[in-house]
Image (cartoon, rainbow, N blue to C red):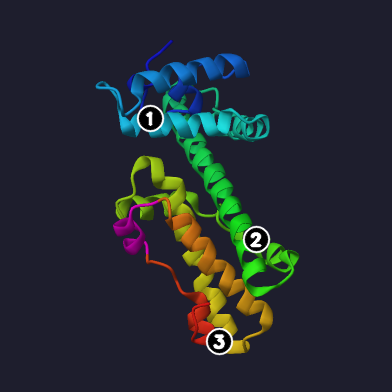
Amino acid sequence: MQNPATKATNPSLYDLLGMPTSSTQESLQRAYRRLAMLHHPDRQSGDPSLMGQINEAWFVLSDPTRRSQYDQTLRKASFIGDAQHRFSARRKLGKKAAWFAGIRLQTLRLGDEAARSATQALSVRHKTPQSTYEELAASITQTLGRDTKKRIQQSRQAGAAPLDLALAAGLVGLNAYCAPFLRRSLREGITESDVHRAQLIDRMWDNLAHGINRDVEIRLGGNPRALKSLTGRRV
């Protein structure tokens, strides 16, 4: 099996596991476990950065639905013309696009988890039907997968570690959603739905930020405190 550390920059998720795209789920799992043992940070030879990339690869490839979506992206991104001199450049672009697609999928997953946790907690706290928050959460989470390349760049500039890029990109996306929402609400008048949406934004931010370095969170803008901006209160 190939050592993924020898692969080019922005390798495909299969490259990270040192396996071909035709691999079975069982062979991918064996490869992941072997690499996890080799590169785990607790080992003297461990590489935390590489381990993070390997974990991200396994997250996408371990789920049949996510793997199928990724494979489609990989095939489209890897399409090349017949001209031989363009093969290498297009191949690199394909792998890079596939890597970004993997980060996007992870960002959406993390956003969905943060939203589910937030809807449950807010429903109990405010004695509001959970469905009220769930309907609003869907419109928020679906925006977190946009502009992935730009948001990863912002996350890197803020100092996010490779393993935290998807998480940081989610926070960037949440802030990007919040700003126009607040402007519209303050301009057109605050509704009860706006209050619920603001509560969701604040709670989702806290849920996502829980897994990231505090200094990085601050450099990403910090919790937007949407509810306080609308009502002057924090809960």
Which of discs 1 and 2 lies nearer the camera? The answer is 2
Q: Quadrant of residue 219?
A: bottom left
Residue sitting at x 47%, y 28% = 12
Disc 2 packing (10 Å; few <14; some 14–19; many ≥20): some
Q: Magenta includes 180?
A: no
**Which one is earlier in the sequence, the residue at label 1 or at label 3?**
1
The residue identified by callout 1 is 51
Image coordinates for residue 115, horizontal then vertical, percent = 60, 58
> Disc 2 residue type?
Gln
Residue at the far left in the pictured view:
44
Instruction: Name the mark on residue 76.
Output: none
Structural distance between the alpha carbons of marks 1 and 3: 45 Å
| Element type where label 2 sits in the image | helix
Position of the N terminus, as image quadrant, is top left
Pick whichever, 176 or 116, lies toward us: 116
According to the picture, the residue beneath numbered tag 2 turns out to be 120
The kind of residue on which mark 1 rests is Met
**Alpha carbon separation for disc pair 3 and 2:** 27 Å
- Residue 186's tag is 3
Query: What amino acid does circle 3 point to?
Result: Leu
Q: Give whichever of 57, 71 is nearer the camera.
A: 57
Q: Residues within 10 Å of mark 3 (few under 14, many from 20)?
A: some
What residue range appears in magenta? 212-220
In the image, taking residue 40 as reference, residue 233 lies left or right, namely right
Q: Position of residue 189 (x, y in %)?
A: 62, 89
